[in-house]
Amino acid sequence: MTPAFRTLLALTGVLLSAPLAAKEPAPAPLPDLAVMDSKALAALFTEDDNRWKREPCTFGAPVLAALEAKAVRPVPVRRLRLIAEALCADREKRYADGAQLAVAITTLTPDDPATGLALYFARRLEDAASLIAILRGLDDAALGTLDKDDYWSVGRTVAGLGRRDDLDALALEWASGGKFAFLDTALHEGIAMAGLRAAAKAGRGDLAEGLLVSITSPVSYIEMLRLRSYAPFWPQIEARAGANLATIGDEHVRAARARLTNAPEDRDRFSEAAHALHYNGQFEEAIALAQRWRERAARGKAIEEGDAWALNIEAYAYDSLGQTRKADAVFEELAKYDPEEHKWVVNFVINRASRLVGQGRWREGLKATDLARKVADAHGSTYAKLIIANNRACALERLGRPDEATDELAYLRANWKEGVGLTAQGLLCYGLRDEATALLIEGLRNPAARDRTLGAFATDELDLFYTATILPQASDLLAAYPDLAAELALHSRPMPEAFMPQAALKRVARKEGAPR
């Protein structure tokens, strides 16, 4: 076997991540594939390991088809050819064809199913039934390879299509059927929360304690203590949370530290440990942990997304301590990374701009949105672009330039279901209280938009991640709009004072015009 062909076979293990779609570059002409032998075809294919993904229609599929016809071991090559054809189907928006190709890949190599690809095309088709069927059809081995980002994407899509209860029921099946032994531990908490909702609906109080064991994040307890979908289990949730969420916060820190100790080079676990400390009000310790990234950098280690999230937490922890300039410096450091090399930079240039606007630093924030928009145009979701439109609209209003925000408000209105809280806040910056209220009521009444809408009413004290903001909030409307308050009360209750998180109580308050 030639070295080139060995490289080709290694590529059959490539994992595909959504979104797949991108414009295919103008193809370079191909040689006459019919007259080339397998060695020459393999050499052509491996000249550039990524060309088949950049040009799946004009290079990947035809070259792999020619090579498959001459390969001694055709199955691995056929699998890669089917993946190239699926990429091509995505480029050409033939999502139904892509879904069939994902089935063909799984049929060809059942021990290595194309789960991520199948879920991707089902999401593109907005086919909730297929998404749930794909997950339900996973055997124990396939559950062990279920990617956490794929699962969260399915959850968002299914909820948006009004089928969250069906996914919750599947989560309860997994939890009660012993499937956690096979699933990535990073999925346990989210699946347990979904299972708890289903258990509440089914009157399965006997399952509550077992499910709560897998839920340790204070962020999750804030949600469960507020939303009425968990109401049957509020006494158990309250007992486990402890006053000011201190009991569960300490457990979360212990669990996150243990996971990091078990895999110290895992950058996602590094990030999770920093988040756990921050959520528990241990700001100095979160900063100290995040700064360990610089020890890795000194050893020549390249930054990974998990490192960047830990640095983001470092900045927010500095804000919580009132050390704003130190937080500024961390975000300036993150903004220097090349978004073409590190596509995750989009998260941090947006958080940088949003933080500045939320602190009332209008000119700095508006300027920061220029970079955020440039990066988001290439690598950002609709939600990311909504954050930027929100930030720009509010900053422009405070700077006395509302006429320049017409396009921002139009974008917020056009995409409000993707981020109803962001749209409502943008409208509130312009005093459009009636319009914001109408959107929020519609969102609460629409099962597909309800989850996002409920999130809009989480006040600063209940948001353990972001730096506190001085921008208007959806909750500001409740006293003046009884219809909105009544609709919200159907789905949520005020957070009981005894469980206000200790992290929020330890933060240094920020007001517009305060010394910085």
Image (spheres, helix red, strand yellow):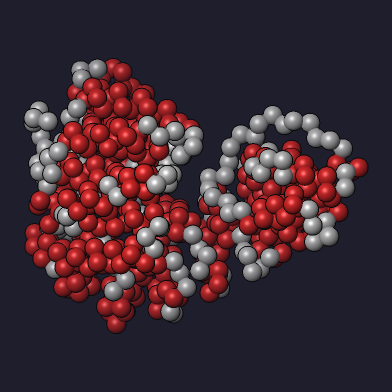
Q: Is residue 3 left or right of residue 335?
A: right
Q: Locate the C terminus and report the quarter of the image it occupies.
A: top left
Q: Is residue 46 left or right of residue 278?
A: right
Q: Is residue 42 left or right of residue 305?
A: right
Q: Is residue 217 above or below residue 483?
A: below
- The x, y position of residue 13, in whole percent, is 63, 57
- The x, y position of residue 133, in whole percent, is 54, 66
The residue that appears at 83% across and 49% down in the rendered structure is 39
Q: Quadrant of residue 477?
A: top left
Residue 304 or residue 515, whichever sits in front: 304
The residue that appears at 62% across and 44% down in the rendered structure is 90
Total numbered circles: 0
- Is residue 266 in sight in this rendering? yes
Q: Is residue 310 above or below residue 219?
A: above
Q: Is residue 278 left or right of residue 304?
A: left
Q: Locate the N terminus and report the quarter of the image it occupies.
A: bottom right
Q: Quadrant of residue 175?
A: bottom left
Of all residues, the one furthest to the bottom in this rendering is 206
The residue that appears at 42% across and 46% down in the rendered structure is 301
- Is residue 193 in sight in this rendering? no
The residue that appears at 52% across and 65% down in the rendered structure is 145
- The x, y position of residue 91, in whole percent, is 63, 40
